[in-house]
Structures are given as C-alpha cells and as structure tokens.
Amino acid sequence: MSIIEMIPVTKPYLPNRDKFDKYIDGIYERQWLTNNGQLVQLLTHRLASYLGVENLLLVANGTLALQIAYRALGISDDQSKVCPEAITTPFTFIATASSLKWDGVEPVFVDIDPDTWCMNPENIEAAITPNTRAIVPVHVFGNACDVEAIDNIAHKHNLKVVYDASHAFGVKYKGESLLNYGDAATLSFHATKLFHTGEGGAIVFKRKEDLERAKKMINFGITGPECIEELGINAKMSELQAAMGLCVLDEIEENLKARSVIWRWYEEALSNDLQLQAKHQFLDYNFAYFPVVFDSEEQVVRAVTALKENGVLARRYFYPSLESVTCLDVDVSQSVSSEIASRILCLPIFYQLSKADQKKITELIKTELSACN
Ligand SMILES: *Cc1c(COP(=O)(O)O)cnc(C)c1O
C-alpha cells in the first residue's frame, strides 16, 4: 500500500476552493503580497474576535511565535552575563524546548501530571534558580494547564509565563479564552493544526506595550522608511497565508463539529480499555487530538504495527520525552513524562475521517488488546 492510500494521523483542512481563489484574485488586483497587508489585518481582527482576545499578532509560524514572545518579554535578551533559564515541560513537540535553546535560554524540565499530561505545578518551585527568567508550560493536546497555580508561582518569583498554546486554538477555560492566561500565549497555524494558514502562527500578549515591541521585532526592527529602531528578525505572515486562514476560519464551526463527533465516538469505543487524557474540569475542548495510553510499550508497538499493516498511520506523539533528546543537552530523568511518552499513541482525527475507518481503527486496537491479555 502506498503512503498516499494510508489513513494518516491528521490531514490538512482544505477550505472551499472558489472562495480561496477570490482572495487570491484580490491579492493580484492589489499587488500586495506581504508586509501587514489587507488580508493579514482582516485575519488579525477576525481571529481576535473569534477567540475573544486582545493584542493578537500574526507571525510566520508557531516556532517564531515562541521566539518573538521570549524576546518581547525580555526573557532571551538578558543583558547580564549569566545564561537565562526557563522552566518547561518535557512532554511536548520539540519546538517548545528547541526554541528556548536556539535563543540562548536553557530549558529546565519539570515533570508532568500523570493524568492531565501538563506540567505539574508542584514541581516548579524546586527548579527555580537565580537564573530562572520564565515558565513555558504547554496546554498539551489542548488541555488546560493548571493556570492559576502556575501564574501564582510566577508572580511570587517575578517570572514571566509564556504558554505554548499551539494545540489550544479556540479552547475555553471557565467560559473565556484560555489564551488570556500568561504574559503571552502562542499558537501554531501549521497545516496539521486544527486552524491553519499553511505555515503560520500568532502571539496573544497580555499587555499592549509587549505587542507593540513585538510588532517591530517581526519586521527587522524597522519603524519607518529610514529608521531601524532595534534588533529584529523577519517573522511576518504573508497575504497568501492570511488568505488560507480566512477561508479555514469561515468553515471552522463545521470542522469542529465533525471532529467532536469523531472524538466522542472514539471515547465511547475506547475509554474502558485505554487511558485517556483527564481534561481540566473547567475546559471547553476543541477536539484537536485523540491520544490514548496503553498499559505497556510492547502493547503500543504492537498496535502501531497492526494499524500500519492495515493502512493506518497512528503516531507516537509525544515520543520520546524531550529530556532524552541529546541536542537539548538536558539529561535529567523525567519519570512520569517518559512513562506516558513510551505508551502513548495519537489516533487519526481529521475532518473527512469516515465512520467506517474509525470502526476499523478501534477494532484493530481492541483485537491487539485482547491478544495481549
Ligand atoms: C506545532 C507546534 C509548534 C511549532 O509550530 P510551527 O508552526 O510548526 O513552527 C510548537 N509547539 C507545539 C506544542 C506544537 O505542537
């Protein structure tokens, strides 16, 4: 079977083509392709209003969103001679930790909660040193971190908080956007994410002055035709990306609805057999991922093999736990994270996934589980 015929773990959402073409026509008419164009401005307003946030800045991707947030909040451009540190989670996509390291901030891992798989706030204070500048937790798979506890610790120790909210598009906590927590929260709009612009991302800042600083940073620090005010980089979103985003946003409710049906069906079929992520009690979830945890690594490997032999590409996200990634140079064992990582599997979930394919997936898993017992 060729890889094209297989059922992937996710598929990019492709919106109505005619509508996309109309936006492209507009780009041709205006002959304006990037640098805060009309579509980027429109998407900024529409996203801020859809998400219920202020101070939203669109950027080129979710990794630069993190890096710009570190800079704008003064985490990575520390003028003292010491190497700044940030406390983060080992159970996430590599970019959370590698973006810190890339910007000269040492990632310091603290272990996760075994049920929610988010950073356990009880582990944070022991990891704080005089060089700690920030806490960078992840709302992993769209679950909310213990935001009140984390923000309290940050306040007490005068630390910045940047939530990597790449998975948390549209997630609400206590009836409001989860993105309103922290000094900044970042989103990824990569093609595989729930809402996407092909490549892209955004930062939601708590304070307007941080947004203003970041706006300069994403455009080389340029503030006028002959004025370069500070050190910057290129992290701008283009009009082509924004056009895709506007079309995907128009259809987001249908997308969410289809995913919620798929998600609930999996839950019904598998919750007695496998460990699911315990969601925060005040969460309105976005159905972005369906991860399951098996009893042993042997089981997960057998399930992956059986699914693959039958044309299904489930993925072991997030494996390995990041403390074992050698280029990060942080070899401190994180027992809960490495345990969960070794036994986790993300099942296919995307707009067009058919009920028949879903049945096939759950049946294959159940067959493997009974073979193990
Ligand atoms: C996708 C993702 C990123 C990186 O986003 P890009 O847009 O691919 O650069 C960062 N953190 C997490 C948790 C992600 O899932």
Image: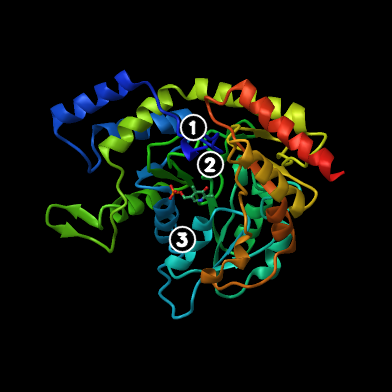
Discs 1, 2 touching: Cβ within 8 Å: yes
Q: Residues within 10 Å of mark 1 (few under 14, many from 20)?
A: some
257 on left or right of 46: right
Discs 3, 2 touching: Cβ within 8 Å: no
- Residue 51 is marked as 1
**How many numbered marks appear?**
3
27 on left or right of 139: left
* Eye-nearest disc, 3 or 2: 3
Q: CA distance from mark 1 to mark 3?
A: 25 Å
Residue 59, percent from left and from top: 35, 46
364 on left or right of 223: right
Q: CA distance from mark 3 to mark 2?
A: 20 Å
The answer to whether the beta carbon of the residue marked 3 is less than 8 Å from any atom of ligand 1 is: yes
Q: First in sequence, mark 1 or 2: give its number.
A: 1
Q: Amino acid at mark 3?
A: Ser
Where 110 sits versus 148, above or below?
A: below
Where does label 3 land, which residue? 99
Q: CA distance from mark 1 to mark 2?
A: 8 Å
Callout 1: SS: helix
**Front-most of 201 and 302?**
302
Residue 318, percent from left and from top: 61, 52
